[in-house]
């Protein structure tokens, strides 16, 4: 971006405005003042980090921070533990410059932030451009593509909390049927509460079937809707998609590996790409891997695995 200065003196040369760093942009914008306070207070000297390098920063407004503090029971920014604050802020930082047009051309998908889980794995960030640019179903871009000397700033209207495996299920329309199954009223297990927890038995590894996978299951078992599946079978089926006390990433999978779920055991096959084989010898392809939440990891599968029938 250039500003050209002209007057009647033909000897004047065009002058270029110096673009500011990400931190300088935030510091000069009154509606980002709490963001600057947070960057100053957080662990890790984030002001220095974001003054160099090449980053895309999703910058929450003052109203966004006020909403975050209120929703989480904090009276002020000073009450947020500085290590937690740092990780939340890093959940708004993507390495490299990402323009809104880059996101729009993809439509939806996952990016990787600089926040981490307790094992040091970088967290994922789901984006969708169906209704503007939205992140994790929580936060929307209100001002895009502010250029900095060290990257790009997008101003957002909500603080993006550290995602759980439930966050990625509820924010992605690909998993609408899975969410409907997890929240069916006659279930005795509150799966949303369990899978949102950061306490034991987290971390979780979730094998998440797509909407199409559930559609194929209903055809396979001769049922017309999810509500027709007996509650005991639905519970044991959902359990067979969840591993407790383990954040099993794709690099941890080996051929022939037995995966002990909350339900029945699955077997990993790498003969034709990563696959899961249930006790009925039904095969599910793992079609997307390592969607990393704070309390676990999600792998997308194209078929519902079943307990032994």
Image: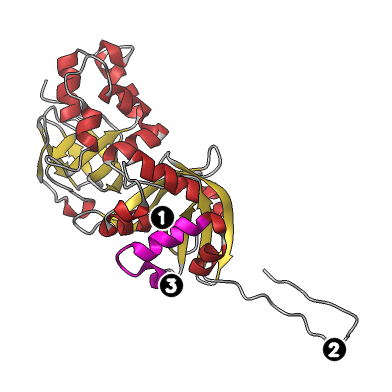
> Spatial distance from mark 2 to mark 3, Cα to Cα?
37 Å
Q: Earlier in the sequence, mark 2 or mark 1?
A: 2
Q: Is residue 29 visible?
A: yes
Judging depth in this view, the residue of 58 and 272 nearest the camera is: 58
Q: Which quarter of the figure is the C terminus placed in?
A: top left
Judging depth in this view, the residue of 10 and 77 nearest the camera is: 77
Q: Earlier in the sequence, mark 1 or mark 3?
A: 3
Q: Is the residue 238 above or below the residue 97 in the image?
A: above
Q: Which residue is mark 1?
A: 92
Judging depth in this view, the residue of 98 and 197 nearest the camera is: 197
Q: Which mark is residue 53?
A: 3
Callout 2: few (<14), some (14-19), or many (20+) C-alpha neighbours within 10 Å?
A: few
Return the residue found at the far front.
75
In terms of image quadrants, where is residue 29? bottom right
Q: Which mark is residue 11?
A: 2
Q: Which mark is residue 287?
A: none
Q: Main secondary structure of the magenta part?
A: helix
Residue at (20, 47) in percent of width and height: 271
């Amino acid at each position: 971006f250039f500003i050209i200065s002209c007057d009647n003196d033909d000897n004047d040369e065009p002058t270029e405005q110096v673009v500011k760093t990400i931190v300088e942009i935030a510091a000069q914008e009154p509606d980002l003042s709490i963001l600057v306070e947070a960057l100053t207070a957080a662990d890790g000297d984030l002001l220095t980090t974001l003054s160099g390098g090449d980053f895309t920063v999703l910058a929450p407004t003052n109203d966004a921070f006020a909403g975050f503090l209120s929703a989480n029971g904090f009276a002020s920014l000073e009450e947020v533990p500085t290590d937690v604050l740092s990780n939340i802020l890093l959940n708004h930082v993507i390495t490299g410059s990402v323009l809104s047009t880059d996101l729009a051309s993809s439509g939806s998908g996952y990016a990787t932030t600089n926040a981490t889980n307790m094992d040091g794995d970088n967290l994922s960030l789901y984006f969708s451009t169906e209704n503007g640019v939205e992140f994790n179903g929580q936060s929307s871009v209100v001002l895009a593509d502010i250029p900095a000397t060290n990257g790009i700033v997008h101003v957002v209207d909500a603080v993006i909390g550290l995602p759980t495996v439930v966050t990625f299920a509820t924010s992605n329309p690909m998993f609408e049927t899975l969410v409907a199954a997890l929240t069916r009223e006659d279930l005795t297990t509150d799966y949303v509460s369990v899978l949102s927890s950061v306490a034991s038995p987290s971390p979780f590894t979730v094998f998440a079937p797509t909407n199409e996978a559930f559609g194929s299951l209903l055809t396979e078992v001769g049922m017309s809707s999810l509500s027709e599946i007996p509650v005991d079978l639905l519970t044991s089926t959902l359990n067979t998609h969840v591993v407790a006390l383990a954040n099993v990433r794709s690099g941890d999978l080996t051929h022939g590996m037995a995966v002990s779920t909350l339900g029945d055991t699955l077997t990993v096959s790498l003969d034709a790409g990563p696959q899961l084989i249930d006790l009925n010898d039904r095969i599910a392809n793992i079609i997307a891997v390592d969607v990393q939440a704070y309390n676990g990891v999600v792998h997308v599968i194209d078929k519902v695995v079943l307990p032994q029938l």
